[in-house]
């Protein structure tokens, strides 16, 4: 039987916050098999790690910084919050491993998967689900490394750690402690089953163009996150035209455009269902010198990118739908739900603003009041259309069955 | 109205549900077949062959082993059944991993190398690199496990296999136990009751996965299976037919009444068609207002014709739906096996093409697939679908061709010319698609796109050419006489804030229509400060008295008069007359289609025409290319015009 519990506290000082957290945990009789922990970037990771090591020696831990706090079934918490989701499952197996990404992120990911399986006592076995948390920047490579072992036979779900102010102050927390450019991999063999969903929203605006040049050396179609040109014109200029000149003020000087572009990401064709195109979202985050565009996901030369647009209210409602979709994927549906975990794009959170309470409310309704924890990330990883992938402005949800 | 985002998510959810239902249906069938096999087996009968057959249909494996506790060696298992059978009798040690499986763990292996049980293995028949699915299964009265194996290099088993294997393991173990337990009869009875319940669930699942909820007809997946089976069952030289039935104007019923009436009509249409067909024929609903009818068996084309005509006539009779008398009809396309296809996809596609041809001719008609005619129709249909997709996804760009004043040696404007960038990135000129776009009612969307591109281009052109150039946008005659479109378009132009920088090129033919163009549309254009150009002048049937009533800002002489003007005295005379007309009306003249230096020289020396456009000046180009070209080449043109001036 699986039990899931969420605990969230808020206090500016990490020690004070952990004291409150400890009191909450002590009030419930829990012997966790896995812990997720997310917190605002103002907190001291080392102190959090020390607390966990003391409170739950040897427990697999995965998490890190989440943009301006967390959410759970009670509400959205502020930037001083620390949230923990404890999974208790004596009939299941869980393991985690972590390391700096290093020069070869794919190889690191593959190695960490093997170690996490060893730590779970399940060496050589296909897990039910792989959960990852990492520094933003090389998500496609880490997924490639994990897929080199499991392919798309099990879902790879997770997020890219975020900070509160998009200043590069994101960290990841694994069993051995915090990292700044790291990857944490957890493997889950749940005895109650796991449902999941990974969805973006947004609709095409009708604008599209072909990525004609990605910054980099070498021959052959390049992939990367620095788009120099679209249709042989400066990428940022083309994009700015698509969105009606909203970035006019930033075109000359360049700089961060994350908040400006949350409602107008790019999309790439991610396959079709019954002839209707599904899109994977790519969030432009800065105008670079020469009117290039940098993005939070990798693009490849020759790929057609589509202008997309979103709507605040739909960003709120979508979270509930994704949570419901994950719960319905359980054997027995939401009636069998023990709890859940939500990864919600930090960019969407900033765009939604004061409607965020609606997001946690929608998820709580879909999960019928069962405990959940939500983190806010700068990239989301999930499984859709039978493939594992990385995207932006997505929502990823997992539902733990009893 | 739901947002497209919501509809897209609903489609994803619906597809997920259908896929899940079909998977669960297949799984339920496997479990029940296994259970029944074991329940009816005699004590000494070996049921494994049938069990392996059932398992193979779902798990898709190339080898299977059943290991049971070895009574002579407590810490090992012995293979008691296998395919290939050479594996029978092989012994395996029970290490940590096998112990977990025996205790209930179902596992898909990433690699078998990690399992100590494989490390001692010495067999040419097995490899640690093979994908394996392990599941516990009590065998007779002994603990055991089942290994499903695939070949090295094949895709490994995934989490859905693990989930199914868990259910299979429980049922199969219980069934084996029942086979040999002292309370066998009671256990068997209990399992039979369970089987009955599971069969009912399986039937319900199968129904949901294979039948349309509204009409009870087979759905698109089911009809494909039925057609495929029917084809296989045909005798040599046998025939069958597929009729694609599409209700005409069904959308109007939904829009005018409501969806409840629409649904009622679909149910009534279903009943009426079913009453017209034989029990061997199969009617299916593909979705929306589309049905497919499998007519089988049939030996004669006449029989097919009679059947389809009967349906057509029946559907023309009135329907009473929720107190409303409704009339409808159906366009039907028919393909016949084997002449028009030898599999479901080909037959359906060709029946669809034939239906499309039928619909284009007239509502309520029947068409039979004709390879010659329908090749064209199929190609055209594909083209139309591609164009619709292109409009939906705005896969267009505007090229711009400059207009210059050869006396002032200045660039004064551009004509916007739409290009369709197809899926392969090929650039298609308007001649390839404008006619089709007009027929399909897509032209207004495309014209809206051109307006947006023109305004965006001003931003690129102004730093290079100054802020006084104008961009011309072509308006088709059909659009010019559509008051609703023109009013909306004029408002759209005004909203850009650049009305004075934009000019509409409207053909002479469209401009001479008194209503509504002259009476309503032209005044509205003038009122908003939008310029008007009379395009392709000389090709219409205008009278001078009509021209006298039109206020325009320029007159473009059709290229047919400019081509080789220096050699054609009749064209020269006509051009002189047009010049006089322009002068009398105060209309600047633009000479279109200037392609050679001789033509340009003639216009400069022998006429008073100032404005020209054509390939000799520059061909149509995308904005950046045009700017680059102009910067590189305009000096040459400037020099040529200087020479002409000085001469």
Image (cartoon, coloured by chain):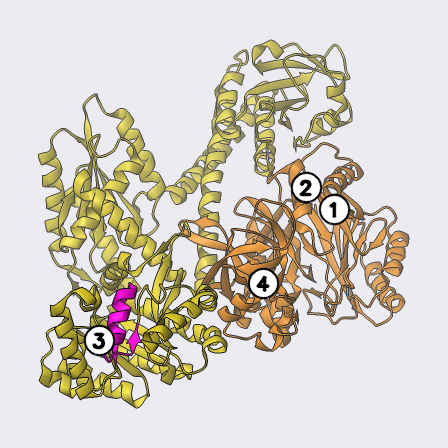
Closer mark to the observer between disc 3 and disc 4: 3
Whole-percent x, y for residue A175 in the image: 83, 49
Image position of B551 (left or right of B446) = left
* Residue matched to label 1: A185
Q: Quadrant of the N terminus of chain A?
A: top right
In 3D space, how far apart are the residues under numbered discs 3 and 2 (Cα atoms)?
A: 76 Å
Q: Residue at x 22, y 42 (%)?
A: B375
For marks 1 and 4, the one nearer the N-term is 1
Q: Are marks 2 and 1 in contact (CB under 8 Å)?
A: yes
SS of the residue under disc 4: helix
Q: Which residue is mark 4?
A: A319
Q: What residue range appears in magenta? A: B589-612
**Labels 1 and 3 touching (C-beta < 8 A):** no
Label 2 secondary element: helix
Q: Which chain is orange?
A: A
Residue, disc 3 = B606
Disc 1/disc 4 C-alpha distance (Å): 24 Å
Vertical comparison of B222 with A321: above or below: above
* Discs 1 and 4 share one subunit: yes
Extreme-bottom residue of the structure: B527
A6 left or right, relative to B523: right
Q: Are marks 2 and 4 in contact (CB under 8 Å)?
A: no
């Amino acid at each position: 039987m699986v039990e899931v519990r969420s605990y969230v506290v808020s206090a500016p000082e990490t020690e004070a916050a952990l004291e409150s957290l400890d009191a909450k945990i002590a009030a419930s009789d829990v012997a966790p098999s896995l812990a997720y922990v997310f917190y605002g970037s103002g907190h001291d990771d080392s102190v959090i790690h020390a607390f966990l090591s003391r409170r739950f020696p040897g427990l697999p831990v995965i998490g890190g910084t989440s943009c301006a706090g967390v959410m759970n079934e009670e509400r959205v918490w502020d930037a001083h919050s620390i949230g923990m989701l404890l999974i208790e499952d004596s009939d299941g197996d869980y393991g985690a491993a972590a390391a700096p990404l290093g020069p070869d992120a794919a190889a690191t990911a593959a190695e960490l998967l093997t170690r996490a399986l060893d730590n779970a006592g399940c060496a050589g076995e296909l897990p039910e689900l792989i959960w990852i948390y990492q520094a933003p920047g090389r998500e496609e490579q880490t997924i490639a490394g994990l897929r080199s072992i499991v392919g798309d036979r099990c879902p790879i779900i997770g997020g890219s750690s975020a900070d509160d102010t998009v200043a590069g102050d994101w960290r990841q927390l694994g069993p051995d402690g915090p990292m700044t450019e790291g990857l944490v991999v957890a493997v889950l063999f749940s005895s109650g089953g796991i449902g999941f969903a990974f969805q973006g929203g947004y609709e095409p605006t009708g604008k599209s163009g072909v990525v004609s040049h990605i910054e980099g050396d070498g021959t052959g179609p390049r992939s990367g996150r620095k788009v120099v040109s679209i249709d042989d014109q400066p990428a940022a200029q083309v994009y700015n035209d698509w969105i009606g000149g909203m970035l006019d003020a930033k075109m000359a000087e360049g700089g961060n455009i994350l908040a400006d572009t949350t409602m107008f990401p790019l999309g790439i064709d991610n396959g079709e269902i019954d002839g209707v195109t599904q899109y994977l979202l790519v969030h432009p985050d800065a105008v670079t010198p020469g009117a290039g565009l940098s993005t939070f996901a990798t693009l490849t030369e020759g790929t057609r990118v589509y202008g997309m647009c979103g709507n605040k209210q739909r960003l709120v409602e979508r979270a509930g739908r994704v949570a419901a979709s994950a719960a319905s994927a359980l054997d027995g549906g939401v009636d069998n739900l023990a709890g859940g975990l939500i990864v919600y794009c930090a960019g969407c959170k900033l765009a939604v603003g004061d409607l965020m309470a609606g997001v946690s409310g929608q998820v709580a309704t879909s999960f019928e009041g069962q405990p959940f924890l939500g983190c806010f990330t700068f990239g989301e990883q999930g499984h859709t259309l039978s493939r594992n992938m990385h995207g932006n402005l997505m929502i990823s949800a997992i539902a733990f069955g009893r | 109205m739901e947002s497209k985002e919501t509809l897209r998510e609903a489609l994803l959810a619906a597809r997920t549900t259908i896929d899940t239902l079909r998977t669960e249906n297949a799984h339920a069938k496997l479990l029940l077949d296994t259970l029944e096999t074991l329940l009816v087996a005699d004590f000494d009968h070996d049921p494994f062959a049938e069990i392996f057959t059932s398992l193979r249909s779902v798990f898709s494996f190339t080898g299977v082993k059943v290991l049971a506790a070895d009574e002579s060696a407590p810490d090992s298992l012995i293979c008691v059944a296998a395919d290939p059978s050479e594996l029978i009798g092989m012994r395996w040690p029970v290490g940590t991993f096998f112990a977990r499986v025996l205790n209930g763990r179902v596992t898909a292996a990433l690699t078998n190398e990690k399992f100590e049980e494989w490390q001692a293995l010495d067999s040419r028949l097995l490899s640690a690199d093979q994908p394996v699915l392990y599941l516990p299964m009590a065998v007779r009265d002994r603990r055991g496990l089942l290994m499903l194996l695939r070949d090295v290099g094949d895709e490994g088993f995934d989490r859905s296999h693990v989930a199914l294997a868990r259910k299979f393991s429980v049922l199969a173990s219980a069934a084996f136990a029942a086979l040999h337990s002292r309370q066998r009869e009671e256990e068997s009875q209990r399992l039979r009751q369970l089987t009955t319940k599971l069969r009912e669930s399986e039937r319900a699942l199968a129904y949901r996965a294979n039948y349309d909820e509204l009409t009870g007809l087979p759905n698109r997946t089911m009809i494909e299976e039925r057609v495929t089976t029917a084809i296989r069952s045909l005798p040599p030289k046998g025939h069958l037919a597929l009729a694609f039935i599409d209700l005409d104007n069904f959308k109007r019923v939904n829009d005018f009444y409501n969806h409840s009436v629409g649904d009622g009509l679909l149910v009534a249409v279903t009943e009426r068609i079913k009453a017209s067909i034989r029990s061997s024929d199969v009617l299916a609903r593909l979705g929306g207002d589309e049905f497919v009818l499998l007519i089988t068996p049939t030996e004669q084309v006449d029989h097919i014709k009679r059947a389809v005509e009967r349906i057509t006539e029946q559907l023309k009779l009135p329907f009473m739906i929720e107190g409303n008398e409704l009339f409808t009809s159906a366009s039907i396309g028919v393909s016949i096996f084997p002449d028009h296809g030898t599999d479901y996809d080909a037959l359906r596609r060709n029946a669809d093409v034939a239906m499309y041809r039928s619909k284009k001719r007239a509502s309520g008609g029947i068409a039979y697939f004709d390879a010659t005619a329908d090749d064209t129709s199929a190609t055209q249909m594909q083209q139309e679908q591609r164009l619709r997709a292109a409009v939906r996804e705005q896969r267009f760009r505007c090229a711009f061709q400059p207009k210059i004043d050869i006396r002032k040696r200045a660039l004064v404007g551009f004509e916007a010319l739409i290009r369709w960038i197809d899926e392969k990135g090929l650039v298609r000129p308007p001649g390839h698609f404008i006619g089709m776009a007009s027929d399909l009612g897509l032209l207004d969307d495309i014209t809206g796109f051109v307006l947006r591109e023109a305004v965006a281009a001003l931003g690129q052109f102004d730093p290079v050419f100054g802020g006084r150039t104008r961009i011309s946008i072509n308006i088709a005659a059909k659009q010019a006489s559509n008051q609703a479109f023109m009013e909306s378009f004029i408002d759209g132009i005004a909203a850009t804030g650049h009305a004075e920088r934009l000019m509409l090129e409207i053909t002479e033919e469209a401009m001479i229509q008194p209503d509504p163009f002259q009476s309503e549309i032209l005044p509205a254009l003038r009122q908003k400060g939008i310029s008007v150009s009379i395009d392709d002048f000389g090709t219409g049937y205008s009278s001078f008295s009509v021209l006298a009533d039109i206020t325009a800002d320029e007159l473009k002489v059709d290229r047919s008069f400019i081509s080789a003007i220096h050699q054609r005295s009749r064209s020269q005379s006509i051009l002189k007359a047009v010049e006089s007309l322009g002068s009398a009306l105060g209309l600047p003249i633009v000479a279109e289609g200037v392609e050679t230096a001789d033509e340009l020289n003639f216009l400069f020396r022998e006429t008073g025409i100032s404005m020209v456009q054509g390939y000799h000046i520059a061909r149509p180009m995308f904005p950046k290319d045009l700017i680059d070209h102009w910067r590189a080449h305009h000096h040459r043109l400037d020099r040529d015009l200087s020479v002409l001036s000085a001469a």
